[in-house]
Amino acid sequence: MPKRVLFLCIHNSARSQMAEAYLKKLGGAAYEVFSAGLEPGTLNPLAINAMALDGVDISKNLTKSVFDYFEKGTSFDYVITVCDASSADKCPVFPGVNKKFSWDFQDPSQLKGNPVEKLNQTILVRDQIKQAVLDFIKLNSNK
């Protein structure tokens, strides 16, 4: 039975989308992966471009509300917030969640600089997320 994992952030526009895509790609059938936001926004073009540069297409993904999962009573084995700690505290509590983690990543929508600088900074965030996902898979492959 695959482990159900939900990645959460504010808008479900970049960080949670990247984490979802990487766990789907790298974790395979061992995971059923979802992402959502507190206030779903529009998919961030910087995240789309950064992921495309690593061979992952998220351009057709939709942003989703965490409250839709909450209201349906969807259960998860893991809930992982990928936003700053103060925002993570606003996320709802899911009944039956075995583990909750908070991964603090910079928000690509808040980056400063010209387009190339912003993309390069988003690539750094992408790489941090990818490494966190790889570490998560390694940690859970021993269980």
Image (cartoon, grey):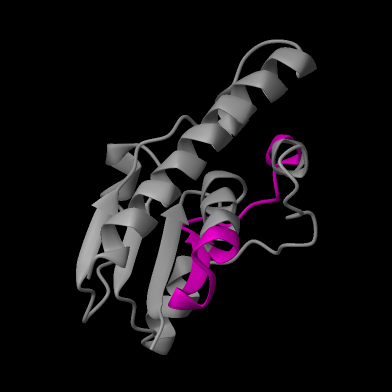
Q: Position of residue 30 (x, y in %)?
A: 44, 76
Quadrant of residue 46 within the rendered picture: top right
Q: Please name the residue shown 48% across and 48% down the image.
A: 10
Horizontal side of residue 57 vs 6, given as left or right: right
Q: Is residue 113 above or below residue 16?
A: above
Quadrant the C terminus occupies? bottom left
Q: Please name the residue shown 56% across and 26% down the image.
A: 124
Q: Please name the residue shown 64% across and 61% down the image.
A: 63
Q: Position of residue 80 (x, y in %)?
A: 35, 57
Q: Is residue 96 above or below residue 67?
A: below
Of residues 101 and 87, the one drawn nearer to the viewer in this rendering: 101
Query: Is 46 in the magenta?
Result: yes
Asked whether residue 82 is in view, the answer is no
Q: Is residue 23 above or below residue 133?
A: below
Horizontal side of residue 66 vs 12, given as left or right: left
Quadrant the N terminus occupies? bottom left
Task: Tell me which segment is drawn in magenta.
Answer: 24-47
Q: Please name the residue shown 60% across and 61% down the image.
A: 25
Asked whether residue 94 is in view, the answer is yes
Q: Position of residue 135 (x, y in %)?
A: 35, 48
